[in-house]
Image (tube, helix red, strand yellow):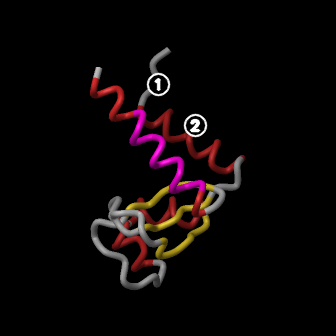
Amino acid sequence: MKYSNIEKSHRQKKIRKARNEHAFIFTNDLSECLAMVEREDWEDVVSFAGGSPADAADLLNIRGVPGDARVLWGRSEEEARAAYINWQKRRSRKKAH
């Protein structure tokens, strides 16, 4: 069964809520976590900001977030970073084949 992007988004939100995940704002190279934001707060404000992490962070009074920041989901900073790195590895293996 093929799902629309909206359906996928709703499923992902339910999963993040059930797992009590947060949004972690990282520098582009993942070397530093700049902030942690509650899931519902981030989902609301990033939509209002047109998807821009820097603009969304500014609306939440989080200053100094660069335009190329990455926002990752997880129960902890370490989990969020590890999940992203694993996803990148899977993605590169798919492209290689």
Of residues 87 and 7, the one drawn nearer to the viewer in this rendering: 87
Which amino acid type is marked by label 1?
Tyr
Mark 2 neighbour density, 10 Å: few (under 14) some (14–19) many (20 or more)? few
What residue is pinned by disc 1? 3
SS at circle 2: helix
Q: Secondary structure at mark 1?
A: loop
Q: Is residue 63 left or right of residue 79?
A: left
Snapshot quadrant of residue 70: bottom left
Residue located at (33% from left, 64% from top): 28
Cβ–Cβ below 8 Å for labels 1 and 2? Answer: yes
Label number found at residue 24: none
User: Where is mark 2, residue-wise?
Assistant: 11
Q: Earlier in the sequence, mark 1 or mark 2?
A: 1
Task: Find residue 25 and report its horizontal and vertical position in percent.
Answer: 46, 67
- Which is nearer the eye, 13 or 74? 74
The quarter of the picture where the C terminus appears is top left
Residue 85 within the magenta-colored segment of the rendering: yes
| Residues in magenta, as a range | 79-90
Distance from label 1 to label 2 (Cα)? 10 Å
